[in-house]
Amino acid sequence: MSAKNWPPYELLDDRVEAAEARTRKLARIYHVSQEQAWDGRALLAQLIERHGGVHVKPEQQESLGKILSILLWGELAAWSISAELAEKLDDVDAKMAATSQVFDEARHFYVLRDYVRAAGITLPRLGGLSKKLLTEMLDTHDLARKLIGMQLLVENIALVLFKQIGDARIEPVLTDLLPYYEKDEARHVGLGVLYLPKLMQGLGRVGRARMWLFQLEVNLLSLGSGLNLREDFHILGLDPRAMTDYSFKLQRDVFRRIRQEDDRAEGGDGEEHSRARAEQDPNLKGMFRMSRQGQQRFTGFLHPGKPLEELDPTHRFFLGGLIKAAAATNRMFS
Ligand SMILES: [Fe+2]
Ligand SMILES: [Fe+2]
């Protein structure tokens, strides 16, 4: 340290402290992942033995196959994307976090593949919109898009499906397996929360607007994909309204965590400060968000709790149109 720069006042700067805290948390994702790594082969064998095999009800096999197909290829996509992030992110701690995710996703993929084999389910080819959603993530060369798309949108869908399938107790081995996935996936979101603001800071206005449109597209693809699975959700006893609610809750949690991290960096004090700044937060600009009221209205529109025929004509017209559009788009991308 040269005399010219002494004393190093920046050591007292809260922002440096906050950035270091962020870095420590990113590296911690890697270490926690190592500590909590589970042996996929041993666990699956043990669960299959405990429950005397995998027994999926014949009437649920086809629908479960469609959902497992999305989850399985989603895991493979997450594996590829996290590997790319591990290679391309230039921050060592973020690299470590992404590297640990690569190991997790590889385990998620092979365990789910082995489960499908043990269940004797033939997986259908991936549906048009779901495939489009995953290829959007794989194709983009923009790291910020990759990170937001994978970590905050696709991981969110996986968490929602895992939780609902587990809660619905469709098949005992799967029910016992999914909490292991959920725990890992919840940790993966941390990389997005901690590192995304840094990537977003490098974007200008146009970049942020493009990012917003990209998220809108991914959200619409995910919505369309969900609409096409309405019948299958019903057969499996999954509640689409609860899924939408849970998905919004997870998104709100992520945005709140990004704000809290940002508040710490700016020296803000807690929840109130965080709420007050939510709308102007530079780190959340370019993020596709809906107000809580908007989310409630959206959920009410999408899941009115009664058949289409019993809805008022306007609601029926728009919801019916959306369902048809989702089916047509699905065919278009198939
Ligand atoms: Fe995963
Ligand atoms: Fe993941």
Image (cartoon, rainbow, N blue to C red):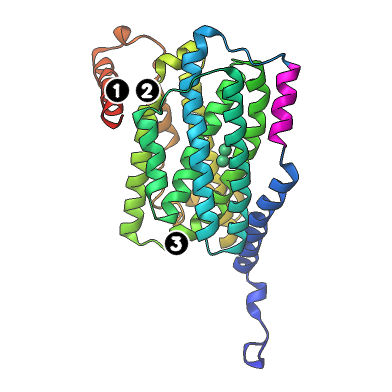
Secondary structure under tag 3 reads helix
Secondary structure under tag 1 reads helix
Q: Which residue is mark 3?
A: 201
Secondary structure under tag 2 reads helix
Quick check: can you spot residue 209?
A: yes
Q: Position of residue 164 (x, y in %)?
A: 56, 22
Amino acid at circle 3: Gln
Ligand 2 lies in which image quarter? Answer: top right
Disc 2 to disc 1, C-alpha distance: 8 Å
First along the sequence among labels 1 and 3: 3
Determine the residue positioned at 27% across, 28% down. 329
Q: Position of residue 180 (x, y in %)?
A: 67, 32
Determine the residue positioned at 59% across, 15% down. 170
Q: Are marks 2 and 1 in contact (CB under 8 Å)?
A: yes
Residue 319 drawn above or below residue 94: above
Q: Observer-nearest residue: 38 or 53?
A: 53
* Residue 327, label in figure: 1
In the image, which residues are magenta?
39-50
Magenta segment, principal secondary structure?
helix
